[in-house]
Amino acid sequence: MTKRTDKKNIKKEKIKRVAMPEQDPGKRKKNFNEVALGYTEEDALREASRCLQCKNPKCIEGCPVGIDIKSFIKLIQEKKFNEALGKIRERNSLPAVCGRVCPQEDQCEKACILGIKDSPVAIGRLERYAADRELKRKVQRPEEFASPEITKQCTREKVAVIGSGPGGITCGSELAKLGYRVTIFEALHKPGGVLVYGIPQFRLPKEIVRREIDYVKSLGVKIEVNMVIGKILTLDDLFSEGFKAVFIATGAGLPRFMGIPGENLNGVYSANEYLTRSNLMKAYKFPRYDTPIIRGDKVAVVGGGNVAMDSARVAKRLGAKHVYLIYRRSEEEMPARNEEVKHAREEGIEFKLLASPVEIIGKDGWVHKVRCIKMELGEPDDSGRRRPIPVEGSELNIEVNVVIMAIGQGPNPLLASTIQRLELTGQGNIKADPDTGKTNIEGVFAGGDIATGTATVILAMGAGKNAAAAIDEYIRTSIW
Amino acid sequence: MYKIVKKEKLAEDIERFYLKAPLIARKAKAGQFIVIRINEDGERIPLTIAGHNRSNGTINIVSERVGKTTALLSSLKKGDSIIDIVGPLGNASEIENFGRVICVGGGVGTAPIFPIARELKKTGNYVISIIGARRKDLLILKKEMENTSDELHICSDNGSIGYHGFVSGFLKEYLEENLTGNADKKKDITRVIAIGPAVMMSAVAEVTRPFNIKTIVSLNSIMVDGTGMCGACRIEVGGETKFVCVDGPEFDGHQVNFDLLLSRQKIYCDHEKECMSLYKHKCGLPE
């Protein structure tokens, strides 16, 4: 054989996308430990080696916050892990979070050239590896990372951010990097928004969120918890206290119910309540923690999004023998990430597709059965998905003792209702310019779910980032 | 952290806590509530603000020892702190000159009725207060209510003080006496505000219904965040689902589905018992 054919053979020997090590489904459905265990260094180097280092990298265009993906993967290839993390952090302050919960398959990885003929580079897993590596070292060698609190002195104008979820955190950290004095106001007792109250431990460990928030604080961002803006301080109070601009990122904190009979029976939860009890209040550790949660042995979850998957998987871990996921369309139309659907199936969640509850039947004030009607799919609707149509006379009862409504969240009206001149959409979202976050009130910006309706962590982060740039420009130029 | 600057015993198992919370004190209005969490493992519970002092930056709450969280609160002393207080939450009471109003306080519900009675009095109302307790030594805030009311009527379940019976029973007799019969003796009552256990508020609403007197009740449902995010506190008012935390806590008593409220208040009964016995065991208290 000549050298030439040798080379050809090596090129032909394709490296397969490195699988994510996971906890065994049989074991993990009984604990709240993280499901995806993360790459080893060997895994990461192997996966990074698949990157072609395209001249014109499409992946970066696919990222809502524009991470220089090509460069950070190059740095991983060179084993320069700290530098790789630094490269990510130039554009994203929450890499350990995004590496876990971003829908990469619809963003950066969707754009990856390798994906045309093969699987795309596992960009999310590499991002997570870089971030976790530092977190791990912080635990092992804390002395190297001593005094992370407020390492930077910010001296420019004061900016207020309302809400410490992904949008607020991103806006705040971007502004702090520019030297602004940022205060983030959080209504709950822990910062992180949906990252702490919504996404379960087994998908996003709270320790990870806490450490990412520590990093944001180290940029000089001040976070005040227990502050319900609109109640303890009004928007006008913030301006009179010297804040030059306000970014509203209060998220989608209004649970939706179906409006069917029996929804107020004991044992019916909004997904928001169910997840908040379990995640934020640690009800899964009751009675070691004081917050209770009903552990039904038969649980119905209504909905087909990520929140529905999270609720179903929490119910399973709380000991339910049967968890039924009731969704009115087919699996194809489910808005949840494929990975979440797969994980839910592996853990034994029973899918009741093409069905929709019409009534919850009670017994002595408690949930006893959920009455569903079968659906069939008609023509596509405004969302492009086929519209579900009830099949007359097809009602059936499913015996359950807990029902969790995970059919979406609306914008929480609490803050907006205290700012009378603020313009809202018909759905109650804040009207904001999609590029800058500017609202109709000078100095007031909004972004994330409160402006767009429920979306993803990374889109809220993108909105936070854009708003930060617009806030900077507004404060520098005073031009609205 | 929020410091307990003063603690007073009002009756057996009932205490008043003065908490340093200047920002909340600055905004608090009669009828609003706070959500507290005592320690890192603690649950979030709502408590009505029983008073506030803007000049020294304190608010006060009155708590009756009934479950683990209130027992834990009761174990704290002056100088101790609780980790979280959120507020002021909910809508303030409607305060204007209605004319003749009746304020009804049952048990520990007398504490939140007091600031409302005081505001109503200040606004020029003729305030008739009816307060009650199971027995004489459990009656709270008698002096304060006396000072802020044009008439004060006291009831006790066992007759150890005042009217022998429930506040709702007294109210019924009072209304019959004052609103029926001789037309020129009639003294119009424009509003009744009742705060206390759900059964008591329900009974008051039933008493006033035939007289067609606007009756406001302040509901004490189970909550988590207190900002409209979870829906744990949902109830039905006039057939519509409402959230007590953001739509209330005060509602038209004639429209409230009290059966549902009572049922929903019992969701975690077994959990509460389990928690309490664990706590007693831990503290070496008799079970």
Image: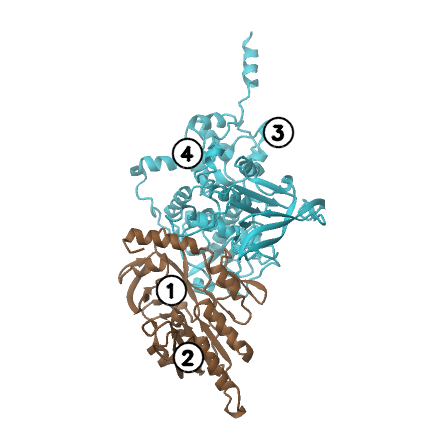
Q: Secondary structure at mark 1?
A: helix
Q: How is the image coloured?
A: by chain
* A176 left or right, relative to B286: right
In terms of secondary structure, where does tag 4 sit? helix
Q: Does any portion of residue A12 appear in the rendered image? A: yes
Callout 1 crowding tier (Cα within 10 Å): few <14, some 14–19, many ≥20: some
Q: Position of residue B201 (x, y in %)?
A: 47, 71
The chain that appears brown in the image is: B
What's the CA distance linking mark 1 and mark 4? 44 Å
The residue nearer to you, when weighing A53 against B28, is: B28
- State if disc 4 and disc 1 touch (CB < 8 Å): no
Q: Nearer the viewer, mark 1 or mark 4?
A: 1
The disc placed on residue A116 is: 3
Q: Amino acid at mark 3?
A: Ile
Identify which amino acid the numbered label 2 is placed on.
Ser
For marks 1 and 3, give the CA distance.
Answer: 58 Å
Q: Secondary structure at mark 2?
A: strand
Q: Which chain is disc 1 placed on?
A: B
The chain holding disc 2 is B
Q: Could you confirm whether marks 3 and 2 are on the same chain?
A: no
Q: Residue at x 68, y 49 (%)?
A: A382
Q: Residue at x 41, y 36 (%)?
A: A132
Q: As displayed, is residue A234 above or below residue A33?
A: below
Q: Which residue is mark 4?
A: A83
Q: Which mark is residue B200?
A: none
Q: Residue A350 placed where, x, y %?
A: 57, 40
Residue located beneath label 2 in the image: B129
Disc 3 and disc 2: Cα gap in Å? Answer: 78 Å
C-alpha distance separating marks 2 and 1: 31 Å
